[in-house]
Image (cartoon, rainbow, N blue to C red):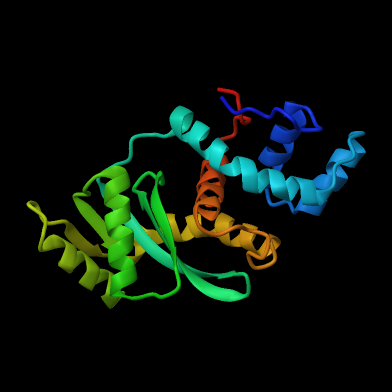
Amino acid sequence: MIRFKGRHFPKDILLTCLRWYLAYQLSYRDIEEMMAERGTQVDHSAIQRWVDQYAPKLEAELTKKWKRPTGSRWRMDETYIKVKGEWKYLYRAVDKSGNTIDFLLTAKRDKKAALRFFKKAIGTAGEPALVNIDKSGANTAALEELNKSMDKPIEIRQCKYLNNVIEQDHRPVKEKMRQAKGGQKVSLGPQYGSWCRTLAHAEKRSACFGRR
């Protein structure tokens, strides 16, 4: 249960603003205007603070209520996004149904970064039977390195069209980053991770936060 004690606005107002921001392609100022049209004056900077503070808590609630078991056949890809004026690499994986496995934001795109991501994803969802990747030599090298310590090696597949599902899945995140002016308004570290994961949940669910 998420507590909103001490806030100047009712719980429903906070949840509505959070849902609009996380689920749709709206900026903080867009939501400020939409709330004003409904008779509620709330500053866009307050909405930004709510996203930073409550996204991790919403992520935990959504994971508890909505998280589906993920499959053992993964589609893995990385894309670049601008965070606070610097280009970063966002590693992500989904199963063949499009359910999010995990993600990792890194400064470099190399074997070391890919290996970090795979270890993190396995810690989250368990060992996959198969991972489909692009032609990246770094990703292949990371999986081969990982397989050296596995009792049952992960099958490595390189088939571009099978990764369409995750390449399409990058779009909402990149669009939201553009709206956040290159990540200048997005906190990094655990805050960023929860923000990004909550966005993934919100994009894939039509129910409002707090409702089944």
Relative to 74, 106 lies left or right? right
In the rendered image, residue 19, in percent from the top left (x then y), is placed at 67, 38
73, above or below 185, in the image: above
64, above or below 173, in the image: above
Residue at x 26%, y 49% (from the top left corner): 73
Count of numbered marks: 0
Quarter of the rendering occupied by the C terminus: top right
Relative to 167, 69 lies left or right? left
**Residue 16 lies in quadrant:** top right
Relative to 51, 172 lies left or right? left
In the rendered image, residue 36, in percent from the top left (x then y), is placed at 90, 40
Q: Do we see residue 134 in this rendering?
A: no
Q: Nearer the viewer, residue 26 or 87?
A: 87
Q: Nearer the viewer, residue 179 or 10?
A: 10
Q: Do we see residue 36 in this rendering?
A: yes
Residue at x 54%, y 55% (from the top left corner): 192
Relative to 154, 10 lies left or right? right
Q: Nearer the viewer, residue 52 or 81?
A: 52
Seen from this angle, which residue lies furthest left? 151
**Residue 165 lies in quadrant:** bottom left
Q: Nearer the viewer, residue 157 or 137?
A: 137
In the rendered image, residue 2, in percent from the top left (x then y), is placed at 59, 28
Seen from this angle, which residue lies furthest front? 6
**Residue 208 lies in quadrant:** top right
Residue at x 70%, y 27% (from the top left corner): 5
Quarter of the rendering occupied by the N terminus: top right
185, above or below 65, in the image: below
206, above or below 117, in the image: above
Residue at x 11%, y 59% (from the top left corner): 149
